[in-house]
Image (cartoon, rainbow, N blue to C red):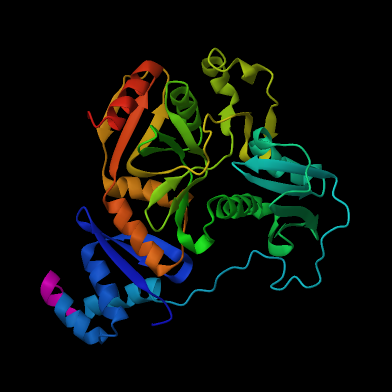
């Protein structure tokens, strides 16, 4: 049983439990969490059953079945799936020629990124084209992206980071972004608490995260707010460090879907001639809007999560929501550090957040609510 580890965090009358196997978070009834704690301490099942039968007034033999079921579900060794083509890449060499070579500048750091073909370019370049700078031999980091054996490979400074199949290409894109933030902010992967599928906004003093299903209007809301005096810290990929638990800026462009153009064109006329990209796998057509952030070293504390949704003709609805409800929506789309210390930091950070739901149809009302949250007026 000691081949895995657990963390337990009481939240709103239940226990959020972290299991080291598969880096899994589950919301459990307190009785279930207590049984896992006792099993982990290797207390005999008969002793656990005896105490449980008294607590819930049930026959001991029935509680044994219940405990055994919990043991099978939560204390069973699990094998991690390896998404790589092979465990060692000694036989894989970088191609001699790359069709596209781009240079991107983030603050004072210049990245040289070489793409084997247009296919690899399409996976990365659209989000970062606004950072493109002139060719130079004076770059700080070199990324290579190429495909071999139907796997997409990423190397950073001549070191192979990994390989991903076509079905796992979103993992490759996430890893590329993770490598970027490590270089931009000088923090290794172990120094990040997590990365969230969200939009991050700031007033240069603190940050707010917008969350919600794809198509709910996170990025459109972010674009509207950055046109009204706020700063875009990050869109779709929001990193938070483990030391201060602050939101760090990420320089990708804001993803704007086709159905948001009517709203945003009067504010951002440049979107009319911006290149359009059809991401068939994600079933969406988007254009990319340059964020208004001019300092990608910025990092700020966050105490508010807003699950935001644009709904045509809807009355404004704003309310605080259950932390457990927010947790169960936040975690599935997030990358969370597998380190036990970072998992404990995440649970503590989350337990202190304010969680809200905001549904709107009138942009002015949404902007007013968000402004009041930043000003602690709600």
Report if residue 25 is visible in the image: yes
- Against 41, residue 337 (above or below) is above
Residue pictured at 27% horizontal, 62% vertical? 9
Q: Quadrant of residue 322 in the image?
A: top left
- Against 289, residue 182 (above or below) is below
Residue pictured at 60% horizontal, 15% vertical? 269
Q: Is residue 210 shown left or right of residue 280?
A: left
Q: Is 161 covered by the magenta stretch?
A: no
Quarter of the image where the N terminus is located: bottom left
Closer to us: 293 or 275: 293
Q: Residue 223: give x, y in percent of width and height.
A: 49, 26
Q: Quadrant of residue 265 in the image?
A: top right
Q: Is residue 196 shown left or right of residue 320?
A: right
Residue pictured at 64% horizontal, 37% vertical? 127
Closer to us: 115 or 51: 115
Q: Is residue 366 shown left or right of residue 321?
A: right
Quarter of the image where the C terminus is located: top left
Q: Residue 15: give x, y in percent of width and height.
A: 26, 61
Instruction: Give the overall secondary structure of the magenta segment.
Output: helix
The magenta stretch spans which residues? Answer: 53-60
């Amino acid at each position: 049983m000691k081949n895995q580890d657990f963390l337990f965090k009481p939240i709103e009358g239940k226990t959020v439990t972290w299991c080291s196997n598969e880096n899994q978070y589950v919301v459990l009834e307190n009785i279930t969490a207590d049984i896992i704690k006792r099993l982990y301490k290797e207390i005999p099942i008969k002793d656990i059953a005896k105490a449980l039968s008294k607590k819930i007034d049930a026959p001991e033999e029935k509680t044994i079945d219940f405990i055994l079921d919990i043991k099978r579900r939560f204390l069973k060794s699990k094998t991690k799936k390896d998404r790589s083509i092979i465990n060692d890449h000694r036989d894989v060499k970088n191609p001699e020629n790359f069709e596209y070579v781009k240079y991107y500048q983030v603050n004072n750091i210049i990245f040289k990124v070489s793409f084997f073909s247009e296919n690899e370019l399409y996976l990365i370049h659209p989000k970062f084209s606004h950072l493109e700078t002139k060719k130079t031999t004076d770059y700080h980091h070199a990324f290579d992206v190429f495909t071999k054996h139907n796997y997409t490979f990423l190397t950073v400074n001549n070191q192979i980071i990994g390989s991903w199949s076509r079905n796992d290409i979103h993992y490759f894109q996430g890893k590329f972004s993770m490598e970027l933030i490590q270089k931009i902010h000088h923090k290794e992967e172990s120094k990040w608490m997590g990365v969230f599928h969200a939009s991050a906004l700031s007033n240069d003093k603190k940050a707010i995260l917008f969350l919600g299903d794809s198509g709910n209007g996170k990025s459109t809301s972010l674009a509207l707010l950055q046109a009204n005096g706020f700063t875009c810290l990050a869109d779709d990929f929001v990193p938070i460090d483990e030391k201060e638990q602050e939101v760090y800026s990420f320089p990708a462009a804001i993803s704007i879907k086709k159905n948001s153009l009517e709203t945003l064109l009067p504010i951002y006329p440049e979107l009319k001639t911006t290149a359009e990209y059809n991401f068939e796998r994600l079933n969406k057509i988007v254009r990319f809007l340059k964020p208004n952030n001019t300092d990608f070293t910025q990092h700020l504390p966050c105490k508010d999560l807003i699950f935001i949704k644009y709904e045509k003709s809807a009355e404004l609805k704003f309310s605080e929501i259950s932390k457990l409800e927010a947790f169960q929506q936040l975690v599935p789309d997030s990358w969370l550090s597998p380190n036990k210390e970072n998992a404990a930091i995440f649970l503590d950070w989350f337990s202190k957040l304010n969680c809200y739901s905001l549904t709107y149809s009138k942009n002015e009302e949404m902007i007013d609510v968000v402004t009041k949250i930043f000003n602690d007026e709600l």
